[in-house]
Amino acid sequence: MEVMGEEVETLDKLPQIRLDTPARPESLPAEKEKIRIEDFSFWYGKTKALDGITSRVYQNRITAYIGPSGCGKSTFLRCLNRMNDLIPHTRWEGRIFLDEEEISRPSLDLTALRRQVGMVFQKSNPFPKTIFENVAFGLRIAGEGNLPKLSAAVEESLKQAALWEEVKDKLERSALALSGGQQQRLCIARALAVRPEVILLDEPCSQLDPISTAKIEELLLDLKSRYTIVLVTHNMQQAARVSDFSGFFLLGQLVEFDDTRKLFTTPSDKRTEDYITGRFG
Amino acid sequence: MERHFDEELEVIRRKLVEMGGLAEQLIGRSIQILVSRDNTLSEEVWPAEQIVNQKQIEIDEGCLELLARHQPMATDLRFLVSTLRITGELERIADQAVNITEAALVLIVRPEVKPLIDIPRMATLASGMVKDSLDAFVRKDTRLARAVLTRDDQVDGYKNQIFRELLTYMLSDPKTIERAIELILISRHLERIADHATNVAEDAIYYVEGRDVRHHAGEAAAPSGESRPF
């Protein structure tokens, strides 16, 4: 553009203002329910550990349940693959559905359920076997004896668990020689080997150093495109970092359940606010 | 280790660049209206300013979420805190562009006091400062940020020159006073825009070096030797 015979260059070059930018990001697509918990209560003997829990676990999302020790969150997690059935004198009311199937009914095939819903525990518990055999274990139990097939499954599971590069040259060594963080990733690989749909993790990082913890957290974020993940932790920073949905347990009740962004920035319940800000008690 | 968190920071960074681009375009557009005397150019100004406002809310929400969820430290923390400040600066810049547009719409239906020379130059300078300060932030380029800080004096020079020149018109012909004041106000808005750009440049330096150079320009000089990466 010329002003008084002088070129004022910027003005001609200004691009048109774009008005096609959406004013607000589009709302999220509806989530698909993977697990549905309906008014579920649970007793150890006469002690009521869970009181009328209603919650949802969404497919391909990480759902975290937080709360102080003894709040019922681990009991709740173990109800999702019926691990509590191993404990005598327990009973429950209410119903839990995996997809459309009720998994809280007494006649359920528990072996089939646990193939669909894998679990990783607080303390890494590799078997005193080789790395290879640890991962292949579930498949061997299920009757798979074909070595090339087993090898392929072991490799894929270890890759998914972000452990392959570290162990590929020592698959025949004892799993017990691995570091704590590696052992925990091995347990995740072992859970993945049987191709579950849901993975339950009970305090998976509480015994790990920050670097190993960060590796597991990155791993969970990678895995959620293929699996539905439920995480129980008293490390609420971890829940805040990795989860999409969060629930806060207190004294056997699910006080609040919401989008993680909401729960950690503007919780609805005063008790949740007090817990996550460290004012609890 | 590649972090998922980095992808989330990248989303924020991209939105900030979009917001800055829009604010910069608004400055250009407001001066274009004044120079071309074409009021049809003003139609997009208000909706565009609304988008800038919306982006501020969106980016701030994103930063708040990441602060709450990740408790970021060091560079990550400084990035998010600086971004929160910068969205405020960009939003004010867009407001100033709207003020210029409003003044321009008053002026263009009346005869020119004088041909416009310094105001378009000043606008080019201020708009360049906005662009460079944000580029400095996004590219972690503190040399560029410091160059923006030194350009602020030129903008102030223009403002004083415009004032002095228009004063002579007003003294010789009182009928020009109203229009001359509008022009002086436009130069004032441009000067404010440049001030906001220097704030963005200071945030860029804080983000990259962890040094707070606000309010003491003398200490804004680069540290001796290589700039120290934090």
Image (spheres, coloured by chain):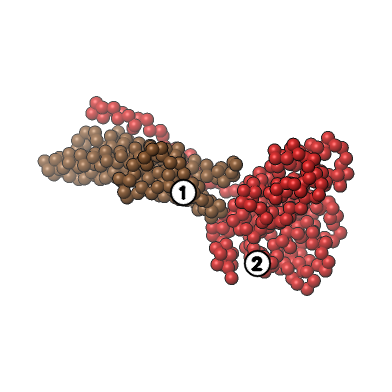
Chain colours: A red, B brown
Is residue A9 in sight in this rendering?
yes
The answer to whether dots 1 and 2 both sit on one chain is no
* Residue identified by numbered label 2: A250
Where is residue B97 shown, x and y percent of the image? 34, 43
Q: Quadrant of the N terminus of chain B?
A: top right
Q: Residue at x 77, y 50 (%)?
A: A126
Q: Which of the two residues, A271 or B18, is positioned nearer the viewer here?
A: A271
Q: Which of the two residues, B126 or B78, is positioned nearer the viewer here?
A: B78
Q: Residue furthest left?
A: B172
* Residue identified by numbered label 1: B78
Q: Residue at x 61, y 54 (%)?
A: A238
Q: Judging from the image, what secondary structure is the residue with disc 1 in?
A: helix
Q: Which of the two residues, A169 or A58, is positioned nearer the viewer here?
A: A169
The amino acid type, in three-letter code, at marker 2 is Leu
Where is residue B69 shown, x and y percent of the image? 56, 54
Q: Tell me: residue B28, above or below residue A27.
A: above
Residue A189's image quarter?
top right
Left or right, A68 with respect to B125, comes to right
Q: Residue furthest bottom?
A: A46
